[in-house]
Image (tube, grey):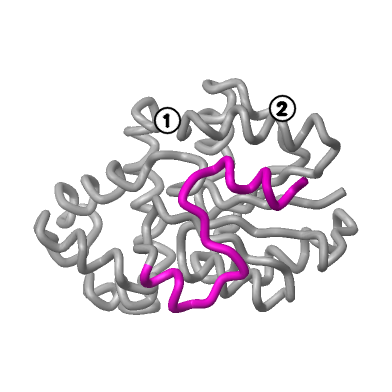
Amino acid sequence: MATYIFDFDGTLADSFAIAFEILLTQASALGCKQLHPSDLDKIKQMHARELLKYLHIPFWRVPRFVKKLRKLGKTKIAEVTIFPEWHEVLTHLKNNNHTLGILSSNAHGSVEIVLRKHGLYELFDFVISGRSLFGKGRYLKRLMKQFNCIHAETYYIGDEVRDIEAAKANKIQAIAVAWGFNSPSRLQAAQPTFIIQHPSEILALAD
């Protein structure tokens, strides 16, 4: 059986619009450049590192910026929903004995609250919070060893270029979703194993 490891925000959770709203309205609190609604299409073409540079966040300030962003995100947690198609897809995968996990840059508590609200938390074998914005590759390597994942049978599903990079660094298959942070064209340029337009497309890979 395969192992499916999911990113959370923008992949399972419909939270990108909320995150963008925080950037639009809380620039002063975050200590970053003030964005405009017209910036949306532009930032969807950016790697996370490029976005931080665009927001005038030097690398040494990234941990503090992420901490503030998470704190502000918690105030909006009641507004975060799961894309409705995921319930059926995840249940099908679990019922067919596949291992399901989450590796997210978001705080574990926030991820758990949303999953429990939608009755999905118990479907996952593990939920890992990677505190470092650019440490997904390392966390992925660690959890694959911990859970004895077979490289050829492990997928990482995410909505950003950095998710694809983390999967490639660990020689596993990268599934990019077309509805999250990065645009389909930006994701395709990073050459994922697959790019999907709808959650149900994962079931074709699993069969």
**On the rendered structure, is 154 left or right of 163?**
right
Going by the numbered disc 1, the residue's amino acid type is: Thr
Q: Earlier in the sequence, mark 1 or mark 2?
A: 1
Which type of secondary structure does the marked residue at label 2 adopt?
Answer: helix
**On the rendered structure, is 40 left or right of 139?**
left
Q: Residue at x 46, y 51 (%)?
A: 197
Mark 1–mark 2 Cα distance, whole angstroms, equals 17 Å
The percent position of residue 104, horizontal first and vertical second, equals 56, 52
- Of residues 86 and 29, which is closer to you in this image? 86
Q: Is residue 40 above or below residue 126?
A: below
The residue beneath circle 2 is 122
Which type of secondary structure does the marked residue at label 1 adopt?
Answer: strand
Q: Residue at x 38, y 73 (%)?
A: 47
Which numbered circle lies on residue 81? 1
Report the magenta residues as a range: 185-207
Q: Residue at x 69, y 29 (%)?
A: 91
Going by the numbered disc 2, the residue's amino acid type is: Glu
- Of residues 164 and 64, which is closer to you in this image? 164
Residue 196, magenta (yes or no) = yes
